[in-house]
Image (cartoon, grey):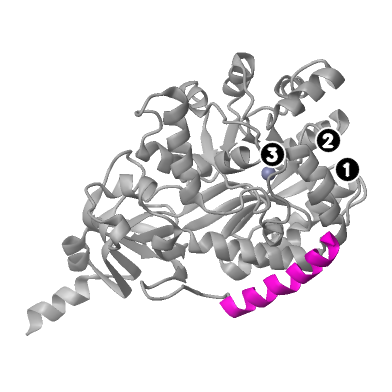
Amino acid sequence: MTEPSKKIVDKINVDLIIEARWLVPVIPRNQVLDYHAVVIHQGCIVDIAAIDAAREQYTATKTVALIEHVLIPGLINLHAHAGMTLMRGLADDIPLMPWLQNHIWPAEQQIVSEKFVRDSTLFGCAEMLAGGVTCFNDMYFYPQASAEAVLQAGMRAQLGLVVLEFPTNYANNADDYIEKGLLTRDAWRGNPLLSASLAPHAPYTVSDTTFQKVITYAEQLGLGVHTHLHETKAEIAESIEKFGVRPIKRMANLGLLGPNLTAAHCVQINDEDLDLLSEHGTHVAHCPSSNAKLGSGIAPIPNLLNTGINVGLGTDGAASNNRQDMFTEMRLAALLAKATTEDATSIPAAQALEMATINGARALGLDHQIGSIEVGKLADLSALRIADVETLPCFDPLSHVIYACGCEHVSHVWVAGDLRFERSSQQSGLYANIEPNELKEIALLWQSKLNHHKA
Ligand SMILES: [Zn+2]
């Protein structure tokens, strides 16, 4: 009787063990571990071992057995405007500039407030969590309101402090945007779930003088920069007319390109653009659904990847996608690459998953903490249940994640080891701190206000 109890005493106490049928750590590439456990203590991954070995070595406060699931790193949405979630479907089937000028900007003028952004961001967080996203790179007005929603959901976010030249409900001019953004960031500096970037909206909405101020602040404060770049042909034509150069060249001349910059879209890219992005180590957020829906084009992602550019994936806002669903983006990124190059080997499943995880983490400067399942990293994890008719049989769980699975297969989502979303096969899903009925009420409230505005 003394032997077994002695053995138990020798075991290491930990907070959580997740046992998975399959484990896809992302690093190393293409690895699928069968019947492995992730051992988690104080939010961090302390061990990855075969299930039997983990049971021998550790005693956990809680053990979760995922007998028909694949465990992957939490997905990272590299380009979002969660504050626009309640504008989903407000104006569809319209090109970018008339969409912005005639629909989105007037609607924002009518409706955007601290309260709207908080509600909208909470809605966006709920949608993303249920789709396996644990971290997103945002850009919107009232970042303090976004921060509150992100913390309620218990997610991780890098919140872009938006900078524009023109007045909005949030700020009056470029200096006002910068000042308000930096004050906000001071309030949540040191929070492990939140980080900040400076987010000059785009080359067509921000002056050279303001870009220079952004560069100075980013350097002084060690912040990343998040912007829209080369989204449409019209953007490039306007830049050539106004500045005599394409926007990427203008950004290079100003000194904006660099390893701290994440450029969303990069749809219209020539060889010179490609060289400039690559030389400066700029990261790209590929948003294939938004680019397709707005008729902007298809970004030449295989060329970018071949040049060594780090490319992550983003959904863009719910007003231009209209889903904040990284499974759609991963699948579309892989399929479009194959279709445009007429090469089925272009962007294989493992690479599509890297784009939605470790590449996003690199762009955010968080790849030492998140983006893969490795010892020492934070336990930001998502599990998918592979047991439904549309996901069976399963020869390769990694390719299933990209080509067969969707948000509806996400069963568990952890952020730093805390369970933030759970859905059994019969349920619509439960959040740790979000009440689904409350979300419905919020949606109806704002929908009635936006409908009124539309009329
Ligand atoms: Zn965007």
Quadrant assignment for the C terminus: bottom right
Disc 2/disc 1 C-alpha distance (Å): 8 Å
In magenta stretch: residue 451: yes
Q: Residues within 10 Å of mark 1 (few under 14, many from 20)?
A: many
Q: Residue at x 68, y 29 (%)?
A: 230
Q: Which SS class for mark 3?
A: strand
Position of residue 45 measured from the top left corner of the image (x, y, whole percent): 37, 58
Nearest the viewer among 184 and 114 is 114
Q: Residues within 10 Å of mark 3 (few under 14, many from 20)?
A: many
Comes first in the chain, label 3 or label 1: 1
Q: Amino acid at mark 3?
A: Val
Would residue 272 be found to the left or right of residue 63 on screen? Answer: right
Q: Tell me the mark number nearer the camera, choosing from 2 and 3.
A: 2
Q: Which residue is mark 3?
A: 225
Q: Residue at x 52, y 49 (%)?
A: 76
Q: Residues within 10 Å of mark 2 (few under 14, many from 20)?
A: some
Would residue 258 be found to the left or right of residue 414 on screen? Answer: right
Residue range corresponding to the magenta coloring = 435-455
Q: Quadrant of residue 50?
A: bottom left
Q: Which residue is mark 1?
A: 174
Q: Quadrant of ligand 1?
A: top right
Comes first in the chain, label 2 or label 1: 1
In magenta stretch: residue 452: yes
Position of residue 73 measured from the top left corner of the image (x, y, whole percent): 41, 52
